[in-house]
Structure formats: C-alpha cells, structure tokens
Amino acid sequence: MIIKKMAVLILLSIFILPNLFAQDKPAEPPKYGWQKSMVGGINLTQTSFDNWVQGGENQLAWQINLNGKFVNDQEKTNWANTGKFTYGNTKSGKEQAKKSIDEIKLESVLTYKLGVLINPFVAVTGETQFAPGYNYGTTPKTQLSAFMDPGYLRESAGVGFKPNEIVKTRLGVALKQTITSDYPAPYADDPQTTKIEKIKNEVGGESVTDVSWKISENSLFTSKLELFSALKSLEETDVNWDNVLTTKISKYFNVNFNFKLFYDRDISKMRQIKQAIALGVSYNFL
C-alpha cells in the first residue's frame, strides 16, 4: 500500500507538477559557474509570569537554522551541494531544557548533461544529529542517540529528470549504510540474530523528488521526497518527506511552516510526523 502511494506521488511530481507550475516567461540564456547561497536564521519564543493570578508557566524556546547551497553549473555538468543544519531547545517552568529539533544533512549530486531532459547522475547523502537524544518518560532519563549514532550514508547512481526550474526528480540504484556505536537498536541491529550489529548495509532503489516553487515575491515553498526500498524487502519503503513554506514579512523577518513525515519500518511500524510554525530573523550570508 505504501509503495503504491509513493508511486502516485512520484508520477504526480513528474507529469502534473511541471504543468501546474509552468511559467510563460521567455527562457533566459544559461549562466555558467558557481552559484552560492547561505541563509541563517534564529527563532525565539519567551513567556514569563510573575504573580499572574490566571496561572501560567515560564517558557523559553529557541531554534537556529543554517541552509547552504553551492552549485557549479557548466555546459556539460552540474555539481550541486546542499547542507541543512538545524538545532533547537525548549525549557518549560522548572524542567530542564529539552531538545526540540536537531538535524544535520549534507547532499552532493553530480549530473552529466546529455542535452535532453533525462540525464545520468551520481549522488552522496549524509544525515545525523548534533546532540544526544533522550527519553524523558523514564526516571532518570534514558539516552537513545548521539552524534553519528545513528548516522546515515547513501550513495546512488541513476538518471535524473528536470522538466523545469521548479521540479526535479532522480531515480537510481543506491547503497545505504546505517552507522551506530552505543545505540545499535533499533537502528542497525538485527533482532533475529544473537550478534549485535552496529553497522547495517542495504542495497536497493532510491527516488528523490525536489520542488522549489516561488509562490509569490515573498513566499517560497520547498519540498523534498526521498524514498528507499531495500532489495531484500521491496514491499517496505523508507519515506522521508520534508516540506517548508517560508513567507517574508520584512527584509529580516519571516514565518516558517514545516511539515515532515518519516517512515522506516526497521525503527517503528508507525509513521512519524513533525510539524512546526516559527517566526524569526533570517540573514543571507552569501
């Protein structure tokens, strides 16, 4: 059922979105060379009470974001490198501060242009977190993860399809490594064996669809849908779908809405959802 739904999403991204987002502007001549961008932001929420009869609890929440993109576009090749770094904390009342968001993601894609819409590519992706993660439902709290524990690496090769500047999709064969150290379960360890595996290697198929749609002068919608199916269990598809809608209020202030869906049956049989709305300050470094 999940594979069928993901297949529908891919077909929509390839055949419908290009027509939906089609623009009538005349084509501009290509600009070759490096294109660089680095955007950082901070979101802060603070609430304090003193002799407040209606009740309430002091709260402090903050989040730091840094997104970089470095693309070297030439006549025959395109080398795109992206990085996403996010970390946030929340403190409520007298409770200790807790991590609210934590992500490190790097991607490098080298595409060879054949002069048609479909072009071959090779790609490398890495993903982990900055700080330890805890289960606060136990006393004392129980650590569940750490930096590169788990860490995810993927190497893939295949063909990419880019009908316009808004939508691009790639499909290929991929190798996936899940790396752990102190916390192999449930990330890398196989519960069906007596040995504790700290590294898991998988071979399968990968599909990645990116959407970058400038809805208006001040609003940008970005979406990244990543699918991976291991050869040994093609009926199970790992899903990582990250959506961000950013609206600029002024030169430095913007509102961000983030919706992320994650599914990996090896970690949990239930799909995981994260949603966040934030108002903050952003700055373009490049």
Image (cartoon, rainbow, N blue to C red):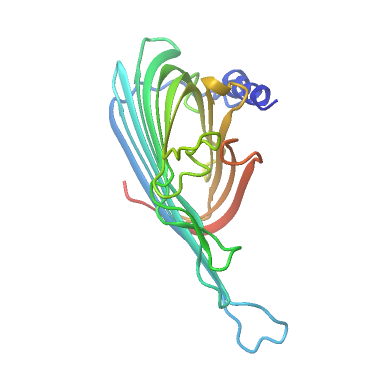
Which image quarter: residue 279? bottom right
Residue at the extreme front of the image, as rendered: 194
Vertically, is 192 above or below 100?
above
Residue 45 appears in the picture as rendered: no
Q: Nearer the viewer, residue 282 or 140?
A: 140
Residue at the extreme right of the image, as rendered: 54
Q: Position of residue 278 (x, y in %)?
A: 55, 57
Which image quarter: residue 150? top left
Q: Nearer the viewer, residue 264 or 13?
A: 264
Side (left or right) of 274 relative to 102: right
Vertically, is 263 above or below 228?
below
Residue drawn at x 36%, y 10% as measured from the top left: 114
Q: Nearer the viewer, residue 243 or 141?
A: 141
Residue drawn at x 53%, y 43% as measured from the top left: 186
Vertically, is 214 above or below 274?
above
Residue at the extreme left of the image, as rendered: 33
Residue drawn at x 46%, y 44% as measured from the top left: 184
Quarter that holds the N terminus: top right
Q: Position of residue 128 (x, y in %)?
A: 42, 45
Q: Position of residue 38 (x, y in %)?
A: 35, 46
* Number of on-image labels: 0
Q: Position of residue 18 (x, y in %)?
A: 57, 22
Which image quarter: residue 215? top right
Residue 63 appears in the picture as rendered: yes
Vertically, is 229 above or below 120?
below
